[in-house]
Image (cartoon, grey):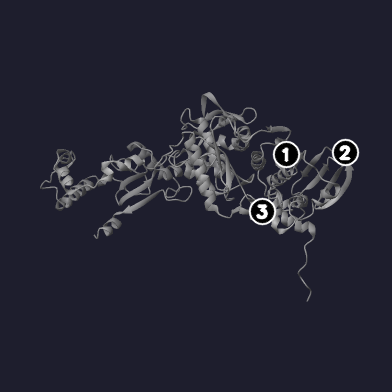
């Protein structure tokens, strides 16, 4: 029988490896920018065409490569940073896996021009489908100029999985920001389709943060700096007024590498406990420097997730550093629970409380003032106050209920009729609704989310919602990634009643809003919508429009804790049971729970 196991050809093996490393244009952007940083560049330019599908080009003034190194760089597992296994535990550079350039060359057409300072001529290499199709000497500036064209040209199925240009551009901007934020001493620029989106002059960390996140942060950043033998934590946290309802500008860097860590994020949130609302999230840019031997950054292909030797220590240090920074700038009180030594010498502390002193105190007028019979809220017993009369209370109540039975709701699944006292709000969150078979407990926020979800869905898929023109249009300034996201959402926003128009680079004008948006709140609703959309579940089963509708429903719904009038409760409940699917919220939670009379009878042994 013929053998069936064989080695894959190099070009196919590289394409498979590329699936891990190069998932979209932004993946190549990350790898190329990190290589430029490792090359010692002080100026790095990123040029994008067609959201990276047509071109991703990185130009740096780093040390460049020799002719041999330029060719070797595209071989699988070729790296200048690893010599033996121990080097994996001493990594301080960015790119090190030796797969990035080989992976890029496997799925794109690559052109490389590079020259070292000591060489008169540079090297020009063209690679396609992992094969060198051209190599020759060339005139070139010191450094490296690498272009990746026509991504996935030879893997059309993977190209079909790419998102819209606006979505892919948003991912590219995210990766660019993360690298630029980590290295403020390097000049970075980003141009897309001939337009410069970022021009970041070299500076310090605060200057770079303000350059990227916007000038509104200039006076709203609190410095964080704690140094120990184990690690150093530095950076900035946003003042409480910068907190957002969704996870906004939150960046962790470990040894200048951007990472994602829900655990460490919780440490920062815990430090803000009691300072910002529980449903808000603080902004921060924090840099952690520690011995590379204490971490493993080779646990994920994108290197955005790392493993700490002792994560609990890092958590405690971060929480303490943020709390200290808040206290130093009088944003949070710094409480001193140590006991003054002088207090220990007072008679009340040092001497025992004798029986004679205790009896004298009990018989004093001051003590009698606070005894039970002298308390202002004391209630003397009456002949009707015993427990034996509890049946009479419920007997009277049941008679009253029977008299109003005809006015109660006939069915929990249909329209709720006005009956004067059919609605009762509990904890400003739950609405109790009477009906003939028992009662309902309605969660007001989840119920309203269902109502709004169906309303917006109808507007999005059937007919455009009405727009209320603003008397005074509102200007909206956004960071570049948010601007790219909003640009992609404009046509869909029109469907649900928003009229937003571009107004220069990263600026928009809000000309109109849905009628139910409170005047003066137009800017906030758009900003919050962008935040919610950014951090929505990445589950592919939701289209862009579906995510937008769900975010709108969540954003504009009546929140738990909001007091409602009788009329508002009735209107909400009636709207809920007019829905196609009234019993569950858009995220699948129940909007109400029904307690039937027979169930209540069984609870009381009837």
Q: In screen coordinates, is 187 left or right of 64?
A: left
- N-terminal label among 1 and 3: 1
Q: Between marks 2 and 3, how big is the CA–CA gap? A: 35 Å
Q: In screen coordinates, is 56 left or right of 353?
A: right
Q: Between marks 2 and 1, how big is the CA–CA gap? A: 24 Å
Residue at 77 percent across and 40 percent down: it is 62
Tell me where residue 420 appears, x and y as whole percent: 28, 39
Look at the image and tell me whether residue 314 can be seen.
yes
Which type of secondary structure does the marked residue at label 2 adopt? loop
Label 3 CA crowd tier, 10 Å (few <14, some 14–19, many 20+): some
In the displayed structure, 554 sits above or below 97; it is: above
The residue sitting at the bottom extreme is 1
Quarter where residue 344 is shown = top left
Look at the image and tell me whether residue 244 can be seen.
no
Which type of secondary structure does the marked residue at label 3 adopt? loop
Q: Between marks 1 and 3, how big is the CA–CA gap? A: 23 Å
Residue at 46 percent across and 30 percent down: it is 518
Tell me where residue 291 appears, x and y as whole percent: 63, 50
Which is more toward the observer, 358 or 21? 358
Quarter where residue 363 is shown = top left
Which is more toward the observer, 246 or 327? 327
Tell whether label 1 touches label 2 (CB within 8 Å).
no
Label 1 CA crowd tier, 10 Å (few <14, some 14–19, many 20+): many
Label annotation for residue 48: 1
Label 2 CA crowd tier, 10 Å (few <14, some 14–19, many 20+): few
- N-terminal label among 2 and 1: 1
The residue that label 2 is drawn on is 139
């Amino acid at each position: 029988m013929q053998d069936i196991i064989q080695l894959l050809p190099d070009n196919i093996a590289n394409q498979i490896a590329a699936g891990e490393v190069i998932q979209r244009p932004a993946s190549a952007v990350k790898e190329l920018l990190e290589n430029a940083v490792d090359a010692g560049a002080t100026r790095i330019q990123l040029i994008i065409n067609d959201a990276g599908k047509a071109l991703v080009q990185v130009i740096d003034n780093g040390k460049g490569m020799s002719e041999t190194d330029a060719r070797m760089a595209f071989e699988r597992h070729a790296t200048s940073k690893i010599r033996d296994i121990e080097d994996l535990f001493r990594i301080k550079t960015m790119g090190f896996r030796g797969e990035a350039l080989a992976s890029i060359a496997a799925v794109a057409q690559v052109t490389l021009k590079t020259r070292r300072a000591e060489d008169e001529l540079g090297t020009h290499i063209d690679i396609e489908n992992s094969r060198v199709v051209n190599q020759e000497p060339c005139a070139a500036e010191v450094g490296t100029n690498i272009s990746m064209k026509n991504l996935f040209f030879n893997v059309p199925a993977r190209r079909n999985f790419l998102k819209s240009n606006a979505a892919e551009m948003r991912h590219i901007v995210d990766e660019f920001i993360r690298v630029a934020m980590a290295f403020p001493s390097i000049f970075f620029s980003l141009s897309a389709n001939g337009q410069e989106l970022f021009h970041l002059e070299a500076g310090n960390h605060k200057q770079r943060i303000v350059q990227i996140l916007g000038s509104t942060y200039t006076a709203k950043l609190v410095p964080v700096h704690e140094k120990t033998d184990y690690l150093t934590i530095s950076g900035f946290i946003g003042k409480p007024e910068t907190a957002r309802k969704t996870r906004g500008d939150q960046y962790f860097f470990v040894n200048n590498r951007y990472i994602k860590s829900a655990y460490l994020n919780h440490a920062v949130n815990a430090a803000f406990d009691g300072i910002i609302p529980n449903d808000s999230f603080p902004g921060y840019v924090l840099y952690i420097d520690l011995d590379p031997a204490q971490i493993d950054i080779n646990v994920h292909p994108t290197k955005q997730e790392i493993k700490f030797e002792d994560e609990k220590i890092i958590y405690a240090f971060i929480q303490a550093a943020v709390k200290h920074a808040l206290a130093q700038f009088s944003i949070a009180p710094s409480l001193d629970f140590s006991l003054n030594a002088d207090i220990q010498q007072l008679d009340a502390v040092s001497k025992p409380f004798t029986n004679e002193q205790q009896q004298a105190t009990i018989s004093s007028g001051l003590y009698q003032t606070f005894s039970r019979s002298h308390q202002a809220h004391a209630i003397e017993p009456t002949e009707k106050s015993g427990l034996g009369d509890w049946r009479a209370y419920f007997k009277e109540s049941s008679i009253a209920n029977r008299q109003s039975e005809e006015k109660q709701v006939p069915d929990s699944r249909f329209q709720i009729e006005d009956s004067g006292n059919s609605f009762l709000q509990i904890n400003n969150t739950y609405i109790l609704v009477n009906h003939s078979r028992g009662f309902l407990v309605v969660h007001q926020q989840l119920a309203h989310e269902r109502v709004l979800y169906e309303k917006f869905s109808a507007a999005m898929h059937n007919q455009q919602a009405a727009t209320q023109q603003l008397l005074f249009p509102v200007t909206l300034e956004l960071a570049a990634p948010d601007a790219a996201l909003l640009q992609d959402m404009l046509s869909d926003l029109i469907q649900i009643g928003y009229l937003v128009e571009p107004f220069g680079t990263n600026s928009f004008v809000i000309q109109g809003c849905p009628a139910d948006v409170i005047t003066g709140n137009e800017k906030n609703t758009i900003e919050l919508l962008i935040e919610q959309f950014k951090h929505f579940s990445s589950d592919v089963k939701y289209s862009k429009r579906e995510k937008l509708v769900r975010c709108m429903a969540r954003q504009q719904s009546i929140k738990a804790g909001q007091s409602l009038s009788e009329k508002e409760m009735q209107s909400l409940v009636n709207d809920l049971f007019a829905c196609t699917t009234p019993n569950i919220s858009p995220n699948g939670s129940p909007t109400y729970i029904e307690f039937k009379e027979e169930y209540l009878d069984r609870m009381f042994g009837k």
